[in-house]
């Protein structure tokens, strides 16, 4: 009798790039195949959930299970495609383990895009985009969202701002306390948005003044305490989602 594969925390969900439709055959990648066969001990007839960010979520059955290959066949769509609010996170990269944690939790919190940005005080000089992408996929699979955040190439802050789409409001998380609280600034704004957080040690004064002078930038504060870089980013995302995103029943966003 066919049954859905289960793992700690819920059913097995896999992100794939192939088109999903009734009867479509999908070949998982090497890592997913190993996971199904050798971790979950899957066999023909077992069922998993698939999503690709375009076609919704599909219930699929393992049609073939060999030693090193698996073929999945789509049965029925279990959820239509749905998008998260149009929120990006621009953040100064931090050392490996906190960055892994930040990417995973940001994906769970519903960002559409992750934009690593080098500031004057950023200590990290190289960013592993593939690792970030893998963490984003894993978090999307675990959290139940139907899309995976886009991970952009890391760029200097000046380049990020020069190429910034002017219609997208950028909430600049400033360490000074002379800005409006993020919850107040974001309330009632329904357009595209992004949050910018800095490195350990904060933004350089030579960065803060030019940022505040830009028409699309809104300086905001996250409260009276000094937060670590990863804490600040996740706190900001949670605040925005609670007043302008899908944490609130009143949150409005365009799919």
Image (cartoon, rainbow, N blue to C red):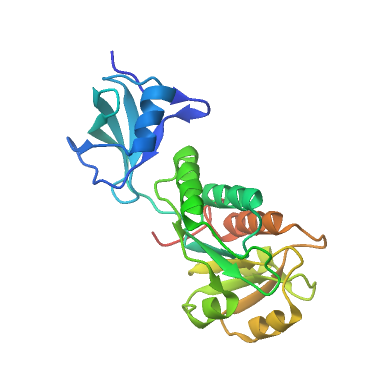
Horizontal side of 227 relative to 60 (left or right) equals right
* Image coordinates for residue 8, horizontal then vertical, percent: 52, 26
Find the residue positioned furthest to the left: 23
Query: Which quadrant would residue 196 be assigned to in this image?
Result: bottom right
Q: Residue at x 70, y 59 (%)?
A: 229
Q: Position of residue 44 (x, y in %)?
A: 26, 20
Nearest the viewer among 57 and 107 is: 107
Please say whether residue 5 is visible from this viewpoint. Answer: no
In the image, residue 138 sits, relative to residue 66, either above or below, namely: below
The extreme top residue here reads 1
The one nearer the camera, 48 or 26, is: 26
Quadrant in the picture for residue 91: bottom right
Q: Is residue 128 above or below residue 182?
A: above
Q: Quick check: 45 left or right of 192?
A: left
For the point 53% across and 56% down, the residue is 250
Percent position (x, y) of residue 54? 30, 51
Total of numbered circles in the picture? Answer: 0
Identity of the residue drawn at 28% across and 47% down: 55
Left or right of 41? Residue 9 is: right
Q: Is residue 196 above or below residue 242?
A: below
* Res 211 quadrant in image: bottom right
- Quarter of the C terminus within the rendering: bottom left
User: Which residue occupies the foreground of this view, 128 or 227?
Assistant: 128
Residue 181 showing in the rendered view:
yes
Q: Please identify the quadrant where the N terminus is shown.
A: top left
Q: Is residue 27 above or below residue 200?
A: above
Q: Position of residue 2 (x, y in %)?
A: 29, 17
Q: Residue at x 27, y 29 (%)?
A: 70
């Amino acid at each position: 009798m066919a049954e859905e594969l289960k793992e700690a925390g819920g059913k097995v969900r896999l992100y794939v790039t192939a088109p999903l439709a009734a009867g479509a055959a999908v070949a998982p990648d090497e890592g997913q195949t190993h996971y199904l066969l050798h971790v979950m001990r899957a066999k023909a007839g077992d069922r998993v959930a698939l999503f690709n960010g375009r076609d919704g979520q599909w219930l699929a059955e393992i049609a073939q299970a060999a030693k090193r290959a698996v073929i999945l066949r789509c049965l029925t769509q279990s959820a239509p495609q749905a998008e998260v609010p149009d929120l990006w996170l621009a953040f100064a990269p931090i050392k490996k383990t906190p960055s892994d944690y930040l990417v995973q939790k940001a994906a769970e919190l519903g960002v559409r895009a992750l934009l690593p940005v080098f500031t004057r005080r950023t200590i990290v000089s190289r960013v592993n985009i593939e690792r970030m992408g893998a963490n984003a996929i894993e978090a999307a699979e675990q959290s139940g969202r139907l899309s995976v955040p886009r991970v952009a190439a890391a760029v200097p802050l000046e380049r990020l701002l020069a190429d910034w789409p002017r219609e997208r409001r950028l909430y600049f998380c400033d360490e000074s306390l002379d800005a409006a609280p993020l919850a107040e600034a974001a309330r009632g704004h329904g357009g595209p948005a992004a949050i910018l957080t800095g490195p350990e040690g904060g933004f350089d004064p030579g960065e803060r003044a030019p940022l505040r002078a830009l028409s699309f930038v809104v300086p905001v504060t996250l409260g009276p305490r000094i937060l670590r870089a990863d804490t600040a980013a996740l706190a900001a995302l949670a605040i925005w989602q609670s007043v302008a995103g899908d944490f609130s029943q009143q949150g409005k966003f365009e799919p």
